[in-house]
Image (spheres, coloured by chain):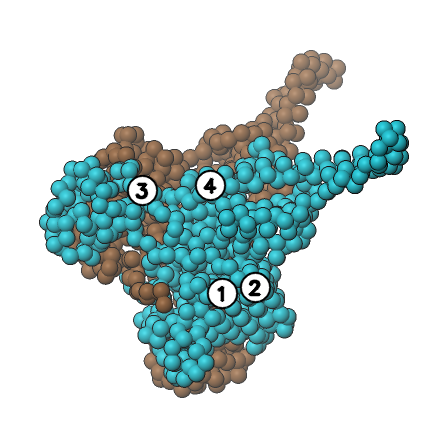
Chain colours: A cyan, B brown
Amino acid sequence: MLEEFKQLSPSEFFYRNKEIAGFSNPSRSLYTSIRELFENSMDACELNEILPEIILFLRRIKRSERGEIYKLYIQDNGGGIPKKHILNALGTILYSSKYVIRQSRGTFGLGGTLALLYGQITTGKPVKVVSSTGNSQIHQYTFKIDIKTNNPIVYSYKAIRNNRGWRGTIIEFYLEGNYSIASRYIINYLKLTATITPYADIIFVDPNGVLYYFPRTISKMPRPPKKVKPHPHGIDLEFLKYLINTFPKTLTIKEFLTRAFHRVGENTAVKFLQYAKIKPTIKLGAINDDILDKLYNSLRSYNKFISPSADVLSPIGEDILIEGIYKEFKPEYVDVTSRNPSSYRGHPFIVEAGMAYGGGIPGQAGDILLFRYANKIPLLFDEGSDVSYKVLDKLKQGSYKIQSDKPIAIFIHIASTKIPFKSVGKEAIADVPEIEREIELALKTLFRRFLKYRRRVIKKKEAEKRLKVYYQYIRLISEFSSKLADREAADINKLLERVKTRYNVKERISQTISKQRS
Amino acid sequence: MLEEFKQLSPSEFFYRNKEIAGFSNPSRSLYTSIRELFENSMDACELNEILPEIILFLRRIKRSERGEIYKLYIQDNGGGIPKKHILNALGTILYSSKYVIRQSRGTFGLGGTLALLYGQITTGKPVKVVSSTGNSQIHQYTFKIDIKTNNPIVYSYKAIRNNRGWRGTIIEFYLEGNYSIASRYIINYLKLTATITPYADIIFVDPNGVLYYFPRTISKMPRPPKKVKPHPHGIDLEFLKYLINTFPKTLTIKEFLTRAFHRVGENTAVKFLQYAKIKPTIKLGAINDDILDKLYNSLRSYNKFISPSADVLSPIGEDILIEGIYKEFKPEYVDVTSRNPSSYRGHPFIVEAGMAYGGGIPGQAGDILLFRYANKIPLLFDEGSDVSYKVLDKLKQGSYKIQSDKPIAIFIHIASTKIPFKSVGKEAIADVPEIEREIELALKTLFRRFLKYRRRVIKKKEAEKRLKVYYQYIRLISEFSSKLADREAADINKLLERVKTRYNVKERISQTISKQRS
């Protein structure tokens, strides 16, 4: 036997396999670190309905042959971390507030701690964290992560009196990176985030001292996401057993169903139990393997459960999306659409999409850029294996051959309590048929409206041309006709009014906002 | 504060995020389960230099509306698992024999246990395992995995007398799946494995009773992979500290370097310490933060360490690769090439490549199929984001415009102690520059030789045509000339000999084998 067996702690596992979470080389790791911590900060604000103000400072500390050392400072005005959780939330892998069913940027509850671990691995320096929930104290720790035991090791602790009621979290640590390569990803990432969060104030000072400021332009925020109970569709046997064990044994199965599941009321529970041929009065303590099996199979096959509610989701909203796209790209044309909520395997989701044309949209004539978002995170890598890319590609090759004289940008946002990511790196979304369908319908709507707009623009251009010809004669004709009819000269300005050549972007924005409000 | 903090066990984390390891839907999960257990079996044979004999039985137990239940039986003749490790190796997440530096199919030490966990989640049934290392006893367990504590729960144990000296492992468990969708992936996977392992006997009986037999055609095996010490390049600070702690404090730093690292001998250690300006006689116990910092930075910047040795790797070998491709595809033309060992960030790797044309290669004229392998695993998904795809695409669009009247297949195998996979699902390899370069060189060699062969074939066809014309006259000319010169008639068969129209595949195989042997 040549094999040696070993057990790894979760820290060791992710330390050894950090590539799978996006920490593959100095430039990518720098990008991932900033992104993960920034996303945690945004979540900490939005969850508490606080208009986000995020400040990022990146300083180059040391240049070296193989890599450079940076100091990253990130400050938010979010809800802060309660004292008893600060060390574990940041210093223990697989310890997180993300392990409930709720839409959030972070899904794996892993990235922030991994970023700090990456910093420790590459520089050996401890992390400094300052946090307060706005109560009388601000807590300041410096700590490292013990990889073997997956526990934080405290280097120092200080409590500071919170005289001004400050609330938020500050993290400061050292890490290896390569900003000259990573910069375009980092800036792109922040710009694309700002595009869908015009209600956030984001400041980034880069190692060259350049300030990137993405100012807040509206003070309306999306409703915060809500925690939700599991939906009976898509539940697995293991989870069902776990749920049963969390309730008292004296509870009846009917009560259990209404308390444990999302969208199961008295009525649904009774009807379902009839379908499953299980007596509603059976106590949880009396459930044997036979009943469990029956219950499980019936939960999966019963097709009359109400679909999960999308009220728990936090979509961007049409008005915020259109404002954001306009703010960041100043296009000639912008349009957005929001699909009705849908669900896959018991997880609710909403698809929102936008389309912009000309103005500040980068690229050349004929380009169709795709900007993908999942739970308000811009996805920059692995575009080719993403469901949105697949759908767009299909439409482009199909009947929607959009030809344009200026570049076009497509924005697709998917909000869900569970985004079906293909990897821990959270870069591509799997092609779940239900999601694919909603994206397709959203894009078709946008394409149709865009083609209509283009036809209108072309028509108007032709009319304008015609008008120029008429223009030379029309006053004469008008005067002549008036005299002939012995009437006063007509007002020809009205005729000219009919041709407004440009689609009015600002008007489109106010239309959307008023539509939303009504 | 709306946030609730929680800690997850590794089992819980992977249970909740099983998609990232390839368990995304019933068909894909069935494929992944078979693949993970099959790969463990192959590793268990090859590591112990045993010619693999693997038997897979998949039976459909129950059809249902939303999914089907299958029973999977897999048997190997590998080294077996020692009794004290059986339960943990299969019933604890992150407990594995893969956590050493060595080339192996499994990298994360996760897939096998996850497959069993997936079965438990979807069917609620325990797993049966039978294993023996060939000693006096065969051990048989049935067990489940406790997700909350990440520990196996034993249902039964039996020791059986091993009268016939049987050695190997049998696993039997139930899982949800969808064979009608998964079948083509499973069969494709086995066929592509058989292509590079002609020394293995693989039997698969599918749920419809169809037998797929991939017979062993040669009894030569690749040399087994070896465990190796870490190479000083690419080591990180955390790991350096860990290494220092595993040696006695009284050891000098010079001794430490020679004992802890791969490719660092007495001489290299002395020269390196001169470069680092560290006294060779310093004891490990006396290393302070300053010295540690100096040591770490110097290890990374010193460029005179000898590259990692590739002796520890287990490449397929040219003769085995050519035999395998021929056995499974019976092409008209087959060629292979093996690059010299190289390394990236301290990890040795070897690129091997093959090219086949016509015969049983599927597809149409002009098709160039890409078959990707990493440590002898065929990679079937996410081709578009793989480094091999990128290189092939570049070459196709560049100067190597290969046009052919029959489909072409390209085989690329990368063997390494650390394959830079992009995700836990092990489907795509990241574009590490060093690996990219070796793949490019291998493909260029194959393309050049193929183009030469094609030119030869075309030339010969033209010659053949000419010959047909001559043929009608050549005997007459020959006779007439002979008479004229008053000599005996010449032997014209030699002229005809010159034109052999076909490249001889069998000959190419024996050439390669004799070249390898010499």
Asked if both marks, 2 and 3, belong to the same chain, the answer given is: yes
Side of A411 relative to A149 (left or right) = right
Side of A75 relative to A255 (left or right) = right
User: Mark 3 falls within which chain?
Assistant: A
Q: Pointer 2: what residue? A: A216
Under mark 3, the amino acid is: Ile
Which structural element holds mark 1?
loop
User: Disc number at residue A306?
Assistant: 3
Under mark 1, the amino acid is: Leu
Q: In which quarter of the image is residue B91?
A: bottom left
Front tag of 2 and 4 = 2
Q: Pointer 1: what residue? A: A51
Residue located at (41% from left, 52% from top): A313
The alpha-carbon separation of the residues under discs 3 and 1 comes to: 34 Å
Q: Is the residue marked by circle 3 packed among few (<14), some (14-19), or many (20+) residues within 10 Å?
A: some
Under mark 4, the amino acid is: Glu
Residue closest to the eye, B267 or B259: B259
Is residue B40 in view? yes
The disc, 4 or 1, on the residue closer to the chain's N-terminal end is 1
Asked if both marks, 4 and 3, belong to the same chain, the answer given is: yes
